[in-house]
Image (cartoon, helix red, strand yellow):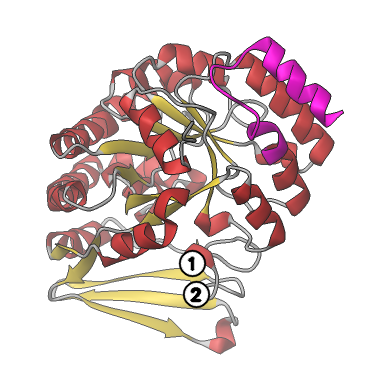
Amino acid sequence: MTVQTFREKILAMLHGDVVESLPFFHWWRHSQIGWAERECRNRGMGICWLRPPHTTILHNVKRQIIHDPSKGSGLYRVVYSTPIGSVYQDEKREPGVGQWHGLRSWRDVTPWHITRLVKRVEDYAVVKYIVDHTEYQPYYFPIEQAKEWLGEDGLVVASLPHSPMQMLMIDWVGSEGGRFYIHHARYREKVDDLYESLVTSYSSMYEIAAHSPADVVMFGDNIDGVLVNPRLFKQYFMPTYDECADILHEQGKFMAVHMDGRLNILKDLIAQTSIDIIEAVHPPPMGDLAIHNALSRWKNKVIWMGYPGSVYTLGPQAVKEHSLQLLRSIIPGDRLSIEMSTENLVSNENLLMLTSILENAELPLTQRQIDRIKKRLA
């Protein structure tokens, strides 16, 4: 009998076809390379790779990166100059940024924005000018290259930036100290105007992604029910997701959105979207929505579950106990894939323990089968 490859399993699940065993995988940007990673991959762990389908061109906008060592070895200022004014943001880059996976440092920390592009109400016009003079062009080589390298061992996902409103919340205005919410209350017209410019600008990017060689396209959002309340989600996020999904679905692509926060308050609204994959869902003890509840609410969606980093901190024995309990809660195991991590590095010991459980999770899951897995690990 032919055994399904990882790529066949994860795509079969998306198409609603038979899947032989529970797909589990590591994101390339978090994965260590070495003996443990090789062993886990030999035992069924896949690799998923985020790669952009486009390049970005700024017209009549000058971008300059300034590094002044006197202000700190890891501090950089990124300045955008336009005919109507300039804006800047300051970044703190830990050692290793630019030398390790996905702009991360050796300690798995991305560049942190110390200051934001939008600091004053006057900055909205400048940032809007930048958005209105941004062009996206298709560039599929990164996806084609990764697909050739991975073959059947993994899945290449076309990556989009934060969706329009999350670009404001997380990148350009920031939510620390309530900044975004204050701006949204005081300068609603400016916020909405910039949001609408991004919505218009992004449309061409969705078309580019839809025609890319990737099977799955993902918005790299960070959805959390405290950061994004139901009112904001319904007004600013659902229309964006549905617009993007419609374009992707016309070309046979699946749409994923990174939702790694507290989702219980948003679960009913999420069910109403056209999203195919809810990615990075973290169950308790980190999130507030159990996976079996999410599966029952989102009947027409696949969940890629981020394994809770807080369990990893307790060591391999805790990983074993939590994972067996997780498997029992999701019987029969439909519409679920496990991500070894979505944000952090995983120790060799934890990676091997989780693999030793998931490699035996044949579908459909049963209590007897899970008991056999437990006995094998005793």
Question: Residue 341 sits in which quadrant?
Answer: top right
Q: Is residue 112 left or right of residue 323?
A: left
Note whether 295 is above or below 169 in the view shown. above
Please identify the quarter of the rendering in which residue 54 is found.
bottom left
Q: Which mark is residue 295?
A: none
Indicate the position of residue 24 as horizontal and vertical percent values. 55, 38
Instruction: Verify CB contact (< 8 Å) between mark 2 and mark 1.
Output: yes
Type of the residue with mark 1: Leu
Dot 2 falls on a residue whose secondary structure is loop
Quick check: is 368 in the magenta stretch? Answer: yes
Q: Say the numbered circle drawn on residue 103.
A: 1
Examine the structure image and report whether residue 223 is included in the region drawn in magenta. no
Taken as a whole, is the magenta stretch helix, strand or loop?
A: helix
What span is in magenta? 355-378
Q: Which residue occupies the foreground of this view, 194 or 154?
A: 154
Vertical position of residue 1 compared to residue 166: above or below = above
Q: In the rendered image, which residue does mark 2 sit on?
A: 98
Q: CA distance from mark 2 to mark 1?
A: 5 Å
